[in-house]
Image: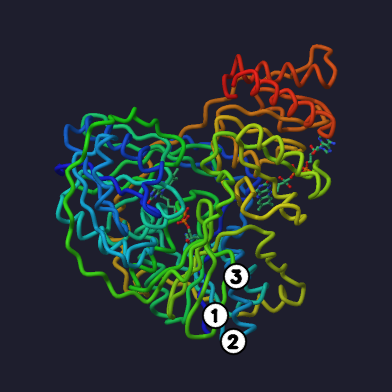
Amino acid sequence: MGKCVCIIAEFRHGAFRRVTYEVASEGKRLADALGVGLCAVAVGSGVADKAAELGRYAVDKVFAVDDPALENYLAESYVPLVADVLAGCDPAAVVMSASVDGKDFAARLSARLKAGLAQDCTQVVCENGKIKAKRPVFAGKCYGWCEWAEGALPVISCRPNVMDCLAPMEDKKAEVEKVQVSIPQTRSCVKSLDLDTSGKVELTEAEIIVSGGRGMKGPENYAMLEELAKVLGAAVGASRAAVDSGWRPHADQVGQTGKVVNPNLYIAVGISGAIQHLAGMGSSKFIVAVNKDSEAPIFSKADYGVVEDLFNFVPAFTEEIRKLKSSCS
Amino acid sequence: MNVAVLLKQTPDTESVIRIASDGKSIVTDDLKWIVNPYDEFAVEAALRLKEKHGGSVTIISWGPQRVVESIRTALAMGADTGVLIDDPALERSDSLGVATALAAAVKELNPDIVLCGSRAVDYDMAQRGPMVAEFLGWPHLALAVSVDSDGKSVTIDRPIEGGKVVLESSLPAVVTFGGSHAVWNPRYASLPGIMKAKKKPLAVKKLADLGVDAAVVGAAKVRVTSMEMPLQRAAGKLVDGGLDTAGKAVELVRALHQEAKVI
Ligand SMILES: Cc1cc2nc3c(=O)[nH]c(=O)nc-3n(C[C@H](O)[C@H](O)[C@H](O)COP(=O)(O)OP(=O)(O)OC[C@H]3O[C@@H](n4cnc5c(N)ncnc54)[C@H](O)[C@@H]3O)c2cc1C
Ligand SMILES: Cc1cc2nc3c(=O)[nH]c(=O)nc-3n(C[C@H](O)[C@H](O)[C@H](O)COP(=O)(O)OP(=O)(O)OC[C@H]3O[C@@H](n4cnc5c(N)ncnc54)[C@H](O)[C@@H]3O)c2cc1C
């Protein structure tokens, strides 16, 4: 067995992304079960100065690959660099986030290492030293448990928002080893990177999502949902019907051919609950449906259902939440 | 520009999935099969590249004989030729094995660009594209919601959490497709297209024909050892009790705050 569990940190614009803490927490549980330490590989520009922070989430040692040329994630350069570091630290398992970049990286890294990959896992267990990982298939209609062949290195990516985060240990610092590397020549490059600075909450990382479907009747009516979302600190999603109608950008589509989300609370407004939509939000912890048709299939998945005309209900609901928020603060 | 598209046949997204008696696979008897929606986007993008630059579009797929129907669908949309890798050794394989076989088929064709779905809607691994690229030693650009090429290089828009990245690569390269129906609006096969597709060349190959060792490809590193259904959600309740609209709003906020504790 290898010497450590190794996580891959995600560093963007001078900070680790929250998913890295989830992955470190899951990595720590796995490392404890295997009786080994927890290492991290962190790639990015300026990452070495920040790497010790990962100690707060139980990382013992960080291999920092720090170079201005590594400002933005690019599979063609990150993968060979990380593969080289991993070859030197003999991991028992490699764990990362199934974020957008994480999934992409995991796939190419596994090919390079000729290692088996379980992508987008929602649970990782270790029984008698043997690692098993559970992942949704058919968009959550069922789950598969993956196991690795004798001697094969498990590579695991964890679905964001699922793994419990450890309480940070404020004063703990990780040991940092700066790895000297030569930057690979690449044929691909990042031409530009634009981050939305409007403070919009990202769907896949949102704790609360308010989603609107064809029942919204037109793009102008989404202002009502935006308002509700603002009061709740939520992100706004949509069904395919709303996206296909051109009412909402495709990035907002929730479902089997859109985003798979798992917030604490999903509020479906004017959405019938087609199987492809349910596939994208069925694992939300709490589901509320607002629909004027009491027979709509969405009600079979909802913890709380409201049979009402959304145009009457949503403003009333928003107002009640506003009252609650002001009484709490 | 010669384009190869990796296409997977998947169960219809409407399908009810049942676990088979072996506990680790699904019942396939009554499934309807479709072209993986993301691969349909890739076919659409391939046809647009061909319209702009000329050349040909070849569909490559691994799977049993039933996959011929999906390859014909892509040929009816306008692709030129198909290659089916039909070899039982791959059934014991994992993503690495399948990617090895697909990469071998690509090498034989030597295209300028390879397009594929970012993920397949059945097992949803999102692995094959980057793996094939790694095995070919080519760059890959993943999750395209737009694609443009001048014949020498390719540029895509890639959505990431809270933003967008523009990626570029010289050719040859692999591009994987994200987005949605609204983004790609894949064309339907026309009736003349369907008639023509029946006569387009479709080669069936074994691993040996591609110079791939079946024993190596069949030795999976990771396997599914069991499957399970999700926990049934407890029956929900309707916020009702004869309340009017405002009353329901009050009751829902109370329930979410006090019972569910999510707001
Ligand atoms: C290959 C494939 C992939 C797909 N992928 C996705 C996907 O990723 N995501 C997705 O969402 N769909 C997807 N679909 C589409 C899916 O099958 C449905 O067509 C779609 O989800 C329907 O959207 P909807 O619920 O908004 O619209 P509808 O089904 O038309 O439902 C509208 C609902 O609004 C209610 N309503 C209307 N007016 C009001 C009112 N005033 N007040 C309250 N309620 C009202 C109605 O009662 C109805 O239930 C996919 C389909 C295919 C074939
Ligand atoms: C429940 C279950 C869970 C599994 N989990 C894992 C796992 O975690 N890791 C693992 O390695 N294996 C796993 N397997 C093994 C599995 O049989 C295959 O690896 C799986 O079918 C491939 O994933 P995908 O098709 O979702 O590929 P993806 O990587 O999601 O496909 C991406 C793209 O690659 C191309 N492509 C994929 N397959 C083909 C094909 N046959 N022909 C042409 N192009 C293709 C398409 O363009 C497609 O859009 C699992 C199997 C089961 C039954």
User: Of marks 2 and 3, which one's residue comes earlier in the chain?
Assistant: 3
Examine the rendered structure and indicate whether residue B241 appears above or below residue A12.
above
Q: Quadrant of residue B37?
A: bottom right
Split into quadrants, the picture shows ligand 2 in the one at bottom left
Q: Do the residues marked 1 and 2 share a common chain?
A: yes
Q: Residue at x 63, y 45 (%)?
A: A254
Which numbered dot is residue B149? 1
User: Of marks 1 and 3, which one's residue comes earlier in the chain?
Assistant: 3
Q: How many residues crowd around disc 1 within 10 Å: few (fewer than 14), some, or many (20 or more)? A: some
Which chain hosts label 2?
A: B
Q: Do the residues marked 1 and 3 share a common chain?
A: yes
Q: Secondary structure at mark 3?
A: helix
Q: Position of residue A85 (x, y in %)?
A: 20, 56
Task: Tell me the distance, in whole angstroms, between the alpha carbons under discs 1 and 2.
Answer: 9 Å
Q: Residue at x 28, y 35 (%)?
A: A56
Task: Tell me the distance, in whole angstroms, between the alpha carbons under discs 2 and 3.
Answer: 15 Å
Q: Do the residues marked 2 and 3 share a common chain?
A: yes
In the image, is A112 to the left or to the right of A74? left
- Residue type pointed to by label 3: Val
Task: Tell me the distance, in whole angstroms, between the alpha carbons under discs 1 and 3.
Answer: 15 Å
Which chain hosts label 3?
A: B
Asked whether mark 2 lies closer than 8 Å to ligand 2, one says no
